[in-house]
Image: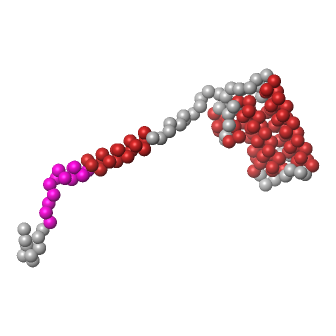
């Protein structure tokens, strides 16, 4: 319909077109959500069972002897000045984690203290926590000898 100035007013759409457009947007959005959610891999939230030793007998003793030898060598290198103190503390922490990882079959070298507690490795977590401040402090809180002794205690107490 034309007004006095000669302009035509816009035509009004029927209301069913609005609802059809909204329905189409909802269908496309739910299709994308279904595609994205159905292709995601399911990851278990928590492992509730405590870690159990995989190795037993002479294999565990071999691991223990090798780890204690490496701990002694690390402490000797730090005492001789061939290894900086911070590196020695980090290596001690890694050696203990590597030993426990080989004994349990778990990837302990990449776990946090909270992960260790969650897997039921409280003694290992306590031993690692004693070495941690020395790894990151500007001046070590404990000497390498004290951290090596803590590492030895964790390895010797492992069963």
Image point (74%, 38%), residue name: 97
Q: Nearer the viewer, residue 143 or 57?
A: 57
Eyeballing the image, is 53 above or below 86?
A: above
Left or right: where 40 falls relative to 22: right
Taking the view exactly as shown, the residue that stands out farthest to the right is 80
- The answer to whether residue 126 is seen in the rendering is no
Q: Residue 78: x and y, percent?
A: 88, 48
Q: Say whether residue 42 is visible.
A: yes
Identity of the residue furthest to the bottom in this view: 5
Tell me which segment is drawn in magenta: 10-22
Q: Residue at x 65, y 27 (%)?
A: 50
Task: Between residue 137 and residue 45, name the one nearer to us.
Answer: 45
Residue 35 position in % (x across, y down): 40, 43
Q: Determine which quarter of the picture holds residue 125.
A: top right
Q: Is residue 42 left or right of residue 119?
A: left
Q: Quadrant of the C terminus?
A: top right
Q: Reply yes or no: does residue 1 show up in magenta.
A: no
Residue at 65 percent of width and 38 percent of height: 114
For residue 83, above or below residue 154: below
Q: Quadrant of the N terminus?
A: bottom left
Residue nearer the viewer, 84 or 145: 84
Q: What's the magenta bit mostly, secondary-structure-wise?
A: helix
Drawn side of residue 139 relative to residue 43, left or right: right
Residue 90 percent location from the top left of the image = 78, 46
Q: Residue at x 79, y 26 (%)?
A: 59
Is residue 21 inside the magenta stretch? yes
């Amino acid at each position: 319909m034309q007004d006095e100035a000669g302009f035509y007013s816009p035509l009004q759409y029927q209301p069913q077109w609005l609802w059809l457009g909204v329905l189409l947007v909802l269908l496309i959005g739910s299709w994308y959500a279904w595609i994205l959610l159905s292709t995601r891999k399911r990851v278990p939230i928590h492992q509730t069972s405590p870690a159990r030793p995989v190795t037993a007998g002479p294999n565990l003793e071999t691991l223990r002897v090798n780890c204690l030898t490496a701990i002694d060598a690390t402490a000797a290198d730090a005492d001789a000045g061939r290894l900086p103190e911070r590196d020695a503390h980090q290596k001690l922490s890694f050696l203990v984690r590597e030993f426990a990882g080989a004994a349990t079959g778990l990837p302990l070298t990449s776990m946090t203290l909270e992960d260790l507690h969650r897997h039921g490795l409280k003694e290992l977590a306590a031993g690692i926590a004693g070495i941690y401040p020395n790894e990151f402090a500007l001046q070590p809180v404990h000497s390498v000898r004290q951290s090596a002794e803590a590492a030895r205690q964790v390895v010797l107490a492992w069963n």
